[in-house]
Amino acid sequence: MTPGYGFVKALHAGSVAKGTALRNANDRDLAVYVKAEQAPEEIPALVNWVRDLVAAAYPAMSEDQIVATTNCVNVRFAGTGLDVDVVPVLYEGEPDDVGYLVSKDDGTKLRTSVRQHLDFIRSRKKAYPKHLAQLIRFTKWWARQQRRRCCRTTGE
């Protein structure tokens, strides 16, 4: 743990960590657990605080490489093209890595556990090793196609 920052741990999260990504070459999600009592309570302030900490850790990066969004900080590594979404998780000491992250849809706090998500998917993949990940990837691909079709017809 880093004194003064409230940093507890970081866990590789998201579909690449679960083995269900459509593409995995240049996109990663990193859940950064921070002590809730040491982090800003207001959502924009929380994300900007994480952005400032990332910027301090990578002083050679330009401002446009470290960008705060609604729910996370996107870090773009220019040399490799790697994009890392650094997602703050407010940790209050609950077991099993349970904490609160910010919804990218509306900015509300959502109770979650990266560890439980990973364990759940890994146990299902173990039970259905040949087809589960492929089914999830197909479902993601289909949903993406439907969103594109909807946006083309509605002009959004």
Image (cartoon, rainbow, N blue to C red):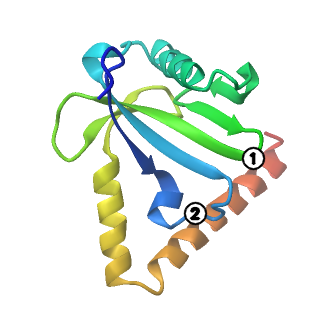
- Where does the image place residue 77, in percent across and percent down from the top left? 70, 39
Can I make out residue 142 in this image?
yes
State which quarter of the image contains the N terminus: top left
State which quarter of the image contains the C terminus: top right
Task: Give left or right: position of 9 versus 107.
Answer: left
Task: Give left or right: position of 45 versus 96.
Answer: right
Number of marks in picture = 2
Mark 1, residue position: 81
**The quarter of the displayed image where residue 139 is located:** bottom right
Q: Is residue 55 above or below residue 30?
A: above
- Where does the image place residue 14, in percent across and percent down from the top left? 48, 52
Task: Give left or right: position of 9 versus 143.
Answer: left
Residue drawn where x is 38% and y is 12% of the image: 40
Look at label 2 and name its amino acid.
Answer: Ala
Q: Is residue 15 above or below residue 128?
A: above
Residue drawn where x is 82% and y is 51% of the image: 153
- Where does the image place residue 130, in percent across and percent down from the top left? 46, 87
SS state under label 2: loop
Can I make out residue 103 in this image?
no
